[in-house]
Image (spheres, rainbow, N blue to C red):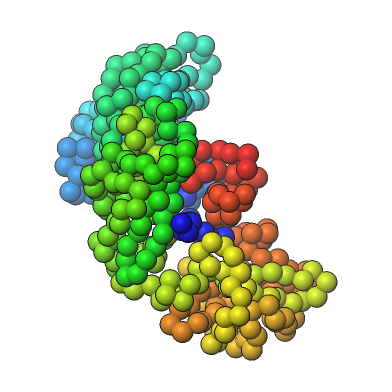
């Protein structure tokens, strides 16, 4: 069975683009110019986050924005017209979205504690613990209540609440009711004196010791189907249920089904017309939930699948300004003897329309002279029949490197690479699995 998940470099296009949630603090200043200003709200966040726009909505009426503003970290926002009650503060910066809830009193905002940590961990297969600490104090603050919510990927939609508990920091929380939910990346929200403190995100997989030998692969077939290859210790196996979500958008459920078995075919026609990206298939085996990634181009018919081409691999010659490309199949093997109809180079800039640069008169493995190219980022596109595959690269006088080695401010904050047969996410010096867990691969 062919392995479907084969990709060398894909940008993380949506969500907040980070493994942990951005921290944001909302406070009421004690005084400004020695005069109390109880109707001023001050917002602070890290230097790496720049807010494009912000707005406040009522927690009881989420259909209308009651206040819209443009502010940066440290700025003050006049909230004098807000009535008493709970509100949600939204900060939008690029593809990132931060949401905080606060309480407006008759004349002031309730001041937040200076919380240093808000972490969660899975202490046992169905047990969660969280920690929270106030600056300058050894004892944890009393928590009024704890929510477990689906991780919020969109400013347009509030987080889904799955559980409530009054467990205090360090106490065990039974999270078995979360099993089988369509949203499998969660966050804890600790409420203290009307203010919410959000934890890092986490995945809950349940009890998986009995299913350690499960292996799942997909074979993609035209026009839009997946054939499941499910094995347990090499023997055909079944899953109690399967559901599919988008990997980088809002993690909403796209397909949900009943039990599936080795050799079953999954119809992906509901995904036709969606963006070309990676999707996550969640399978439940007893009390264990596992996630597997696959790629779908959003088209009704995949001409590259028909041609047997998965992607184009680039190689460099460090002793000369030479680029070579090779077409690879779904098993990540070089395709031998395939004739390329055309190839060309275009510019490649994030969020900019590419511009045609030049045609390439070279077949797979033949040298392409890129010395005439100016320093910058480019994309090589190759066409076979109606199949077109592309890969970005960098041209630089003196030396150049492909996209995985780029050390430039325009480089994506994270890339996916194939290492030891697995797809991993690389962010700076750290490496994560597709489910966001740090790994040493």
61 vs 161, nearest the viewer: 161
Percent from the top left, x then y, of residue 138?
52, 11
Query: x and y percent of residue 59 in the render?
Result: 21, 37
Q: Nearer the viewer, residue 214 or 415?
A: 214
Q: Please identify the quarter of the rendering in which residue 102 is found.
A: top left
Taking the image as shown, residue 222 lies to the left or right of residue 374, namely left
The outermost residue toward the top is 139
- Quarter of the figure with residue 106: top left
Q: Residue at x 58, y 55 (%)?
A: 417
Which residue appears farthest toward the front when viewing the image? 235
**How many discs mark residues in the rendered view?**
0
The reply, left or right, for residue 62 in relation to residue 96 is left
Q: Is residue 160 visible?
A: yes
Task: Tell me the residue at 47%/42% (across/down).
Answer: 234
Residue 54 makes an appearance in the image: no
Q: Quadrant of the C terminus?
A: top right
Q: Residue at x 37, y 29 (%)?
A: 206
Residue 214, image x, y percentages = 44, 39
Q: Answer left or right for 149 relative to 318.
A: left
Residue for point 34% across, 73% down: 301
Task: Judge whether 348 appears above or below 6 on screen.
Answer: below
Instruction: Give coordinates of residue 420: x percent, y percent.
Output: 62, 49
For this rendering, which residue is in front, 256 or 400?
256
**Closer to us: 283 or 381:** 283
- Does residue 77 appear to the left or right of 163 in the view shown? right
């Amino acid at each position: 069975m062919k392995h479907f998940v084969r990709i060398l470099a894909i940008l993380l296009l949506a969500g907040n683009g980070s493994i942990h949630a951005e921290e944001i603090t909302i406070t009421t200043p004690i005084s400004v110019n020695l005069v109390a200003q109880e109707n001023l709200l001050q917002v602070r966040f890290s230097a790496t986050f720049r807010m494009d726009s912000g707005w406040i909505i009522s927690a009881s009426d989420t259909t209308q924005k009651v206040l819209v503003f443009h502010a940066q970290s440290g700025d003050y926002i006049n909230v004098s017209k807000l009535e008493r009650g709970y509100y949600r503060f939204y900060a939008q910066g690029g593809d990132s979205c931060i949401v905080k809830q606060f309480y407006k009193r008759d004349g002031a905002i309730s001041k937040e504690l200076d919380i240093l940590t808000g972490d969660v961990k899975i202490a046992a297969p169905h047990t969660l613990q969280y920690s929270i600490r106030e600056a300058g104090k050894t004892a944890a603050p009393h928590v009024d209540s704890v929510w477990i919510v689906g991780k919020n990927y969109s400013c347009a939609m509030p987080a889904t609440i799955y559980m409530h508990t009054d467990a205090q920091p360090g106490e065990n929380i039974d999270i078995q009711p979360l099993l089988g939910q369509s949203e499998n990346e969660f966050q804890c929200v600790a409420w203290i004196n009307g203010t919410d403190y959000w934890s890092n995100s986490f995945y809950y997989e349940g009890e998986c010791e009995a299913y350690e030998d499960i292996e799942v692969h997909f074979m993609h077939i035209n026009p839009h189907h997946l054939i499941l290859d499910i094995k347990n210790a090499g023997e055909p196996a079944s899953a109690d249920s399967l559901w599919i979500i988008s990997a980088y958008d809002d993690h909403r459920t796209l397909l949900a089904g009943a039990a599936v078995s080795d050799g079953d075919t999954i119809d992906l026609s509901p995904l036709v017309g969606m963006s070309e990206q990676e999707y996550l298939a969640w399978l439940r085996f007893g009390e264990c939930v596992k996630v597997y990634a696959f790629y779908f181009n959003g088209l009704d018919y995949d001409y590259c699948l028909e041609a047997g081409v998965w992607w184009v691999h680039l190689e460099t010659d460090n002793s000369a300004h030479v680029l070579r490309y090779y077409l690879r199949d779904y098993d990540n093997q070089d395709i031998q003897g395939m004739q390329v109809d055309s190839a060309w180079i275009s510019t490649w800039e994030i969020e900019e329309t590419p511009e045609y640069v030049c045609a390439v008169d070279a077949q797979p493995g033949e040298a392409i002279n890129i010395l005439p190219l100016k320093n910058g980022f480019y994309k090589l596109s190759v066409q076979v029949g109606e199949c077109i595959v592309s890969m970005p690269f960098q041209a630089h006088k003196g030396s150049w490197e492909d996209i995985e080695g780029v050390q430039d401010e325009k480089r994506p904050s994270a890339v996916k690479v194939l290492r030891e047969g697995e797809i991993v996410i690389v962010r700076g010096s750290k490496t994560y699995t597709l489910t966001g867990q740090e790994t040493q691969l």
